[in-house]
Image (spheres, rainbow, N blue to C red):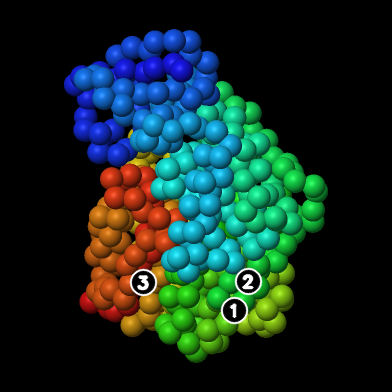
């Protein structure tokens, strides 16, 4: 087994349980190194740090899979995935859930979403990609699923020297499925939907709008397949308009509204939300609830400013479109913008819009995407509801 020895003067991060080892934290490597191999890692004093997979082409040279002296083999993946499933069941996420959330389940760079009997996986690094057959075998053994699909059409794989690809990892099946959520039904396009096909991370937050949308006129921007908007209609909104730049998303949203018999209440338009929010303000339109769930706006730390100004702009416009005492429901899904920075941005928007805010809810993603303390990037979603009044 190849051994990796760490430098003496490195941050406590690894000793404190963080699974990533950067190239500049390695003193020396004894034995042969082939990208993706399992290696044993030792601290400078010779103490065992754990085992993980190596890829010197990646900025993160080693990602640890275990801190114990144990073999990484098929049985290891079977047990890890079983443990992840036990945890989801224990905290009440059964029918649909993020079954494996990478580092948060000690399976770095592995994502598995469970849509009832169907599973969508992403292996986002070379080291985990190698274990795809073992992962598929474990899913088959634990769940006897109706289908498994790979959504590895993700650019980050290229940083690992991997190709982007997607396809069946089981016998082919109809990839347009229907899932249940909060008493509603939604189509999920496993093959061509965004990411793994559906954003499970907002499942609980969609339920959080229940009381404030009653009898309301609701505007939702960045609607994707209309999930928040259809929830709003289901919870008693009078009228709901959802906006998304993607015509395909709008088509799906319309199908979803119809599937739930809410097509008379929910309307969707394929437009750029930045333009639409601006135009609606000019037209002096007013809503009781405005919901915003934009994409990340940035993928890199250097462009956080751009993301922040994007958040500020849409939230400011959203606030201006509200009737006095209306509610803003707003999200941010990138870990690059911290919860603090997000709140400050909303505060700055309120100041410019001359509005006073009263907080109803501030929280993160659903708990099937666990936040592990010390692993900053597991804390990524911000979800805020505020009452907005004139100042
Ligand atoms: N609320 C959705 C997820 C939204 S994902 C859910 O809960 O499932 C973000 C969406 O924003 C994507 O569907 C994307 O097409 C859309 N989008 C990105 N830029 C946009 C823009 N400028 N205007 C409108 N929609 C945009």
Residue 241 appears in view:
no
Q: Is residue 321 left or right of residue 386?
A: right
Residue 15 image point, x, y percent:
25, 34
Circle 2 crowding by C-alpha within 10 Å: few under 14, some 14–19, many from 20: few
Helix, strand or loop for disc 2? strand
Helix, strand or loop for disc 3? strand
Of discs 3 and 1, which sits in the foreground? 1
Chain-order first, disc 3 or disc 1:
1
- Which residue is rendered at x = 41% and y = 48% of the image? 104
Residue 14 image point, x, y percent:
28, 33
Q: Nearer the viewer, residue 258 or 113?
A: 113
- Which residue is rendered at x = 66% and y = 81% of the image? 262
Q: Which residue is mark 1?
A: 183
Of discs 2 and 3, which sits in the foreground? 2
Q: Is residue 91 left or right of residue 48?
A: right
- Which residue is rendered at x = 43% and y = 84% of the image? 211
From the image, which quarter does the C terminus lie in?
Answer: bottom left
Q: Nearer the viewer, residue 220 or 99?
A: 99
Which of the numbered marks, if any, corresponds to residue 68? Answer: none
Do callouts 3 and 1 mark residues in contact (Cβ within 8 Å)?
no
Give the Cα separation between the discs numbered 2 and 1.
6 Å
Q: Which residue is mark 3?
A: 385
Q: Nearer the viewer, residue 390 or 335?
A: 335
Residue 162 appears in view:
yes
Helix, strand or loop for disc 1? loop
- Which residue is rendered at x = 50% and y = 46% of the image? 80
Do callouts 2 and 1 mark residues in contact (Cβ within 8 Å)?
yes
Q: Which residue is mark 2?
A: 180
Give the Cα separation between the discs numbered 3 and 1.
22 Å
């Amino acid at each position: 087994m190849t051994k990796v020895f760490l430098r003496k003067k490195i941050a406590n991060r690894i000793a404190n349980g963080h699974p990533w080892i950067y190239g500049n934290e390695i003193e020396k490597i004894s034995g042969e190194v082939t990208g993706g191999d399992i290696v044993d890692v030792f601290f400078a004093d010779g103490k065992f740090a754990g085992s993980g997979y190596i890829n010197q082409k990646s900025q993160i040279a080693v990602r640890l899979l275990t801190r114990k002296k144990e073999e990484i083999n098929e049985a290891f993946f079977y047990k890890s995935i079983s443990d992840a499933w036990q945890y989801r069941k224990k905290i009440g996420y059964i029918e649909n859930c993020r079954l494996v959330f990478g580092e948060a389940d000690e399976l770095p760079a592995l994502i598995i979403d469970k849509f009832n009997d169907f599973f969508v996986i992403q292996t986002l690094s070379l080291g985990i990609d190698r274990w795809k057959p073992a992962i598929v075998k474990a899913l088959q053994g634990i769940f006897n699923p109706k289908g498994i699909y790979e959504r590895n059409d993700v650019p980050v794989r290229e940083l690992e020297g991997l190709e982007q690809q997607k396809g069946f990892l089981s016998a082919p099946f109809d990839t347009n499925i229907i899932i249940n959520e909060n008493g509603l039904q939604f189509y999920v396009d496993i093959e061509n939907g965004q990411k793994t096909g559906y954003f499970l991370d907002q499942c609980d937050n969609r339920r959080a709008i229940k009381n404030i949308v009653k009898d309301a006129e609701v505007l939702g921007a960045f609607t994707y397949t209309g999930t928040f908007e259809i929830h709003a209609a289901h919870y008693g909104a009078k009228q709901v308009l959802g906006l998304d730049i993607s015509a395909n998303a709008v088509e799906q949203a319309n199908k979803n509204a119809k599937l739930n018999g809410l097509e008379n209440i929910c309307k969707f338009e394929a437009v750029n939300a930045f333009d639409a929010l601006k135009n609606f303000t000019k037209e002096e339109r007013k809503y009781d609830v405005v919901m915003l769930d934009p994409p990340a706006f940035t993928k890199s730390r250097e462009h956080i400013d751009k993301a922040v100004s994007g958040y500020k702009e849409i939230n400011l416009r959203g606030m201006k479109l509200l009737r006095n005492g209306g509610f803003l429901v707003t999200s941010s899904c990138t870990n690059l913008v911290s919860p603090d920075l997000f709140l400050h941005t909303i505060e700055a928007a309120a100041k410019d819009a001359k509005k006073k805010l009263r907080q109803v809810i501030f929280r993160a993603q659903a708990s099937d995407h666990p936040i592990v303390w010390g692993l900053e990037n597991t804390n990524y979603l911000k979800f805020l509801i505020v009452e907005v009044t004139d100042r």
